[in-house]
Image (cartoon, helix red, strand yellow):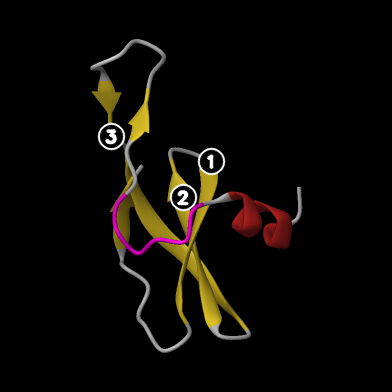
Amino acid sequence: MTATMLAAALIASSHPVHAQSHAPGNQVAVMCMKSGEQTSGMNKICYYDCLGSQVAINVGATELCPLSINH
């Protein structure tokens, strides 16, 4: 999966994202550290390492990527 497809598949948000398990009411948050960023048009794609998996969020091109997110 390319970075562009990955970024398009994620919700554009600068707020932490919580992953939810299949059981209602159970939330497990993983701290993800920033691993890189890329500017694309009027957006910036922020990349994070979440226990070996890559996660991306979109922020405005003039905004700073958070150093960490909860996913």
Q: Secondary structure at mark 1?
A: strand
- First in sequence, mark 3 or 1: give its number: 3
Q: Secondary structure at mark 3?
A: loop
The residue lying at 34 percent from left, 10 percent from top is 23
Kindly identify which numbered label has been placed on residue 53: 1
Confirm whether the magenta stretch covers residue 36.
Answer: no
Q: On the image, numbered disc 3 is attached to which residue?
A: 29
Above or below 20: residue 59: below
Q: Which residue is pictured at 53% across the width and 79% down the height?
A: 43
Q: Amino acid at mark 2?
A: Asp
Q: Residue furthest top?
A: 23
Q: Amino acid at mark 1?
A: Ser
Query: Magenta segment, which residues?
Result: 11-16
Q: Which residue is mark 2?
A: 49
Q: Position of residue 9 (x, y in %)?
A: 62, 50
Q: Quadrant of the C terminus?
A: top left
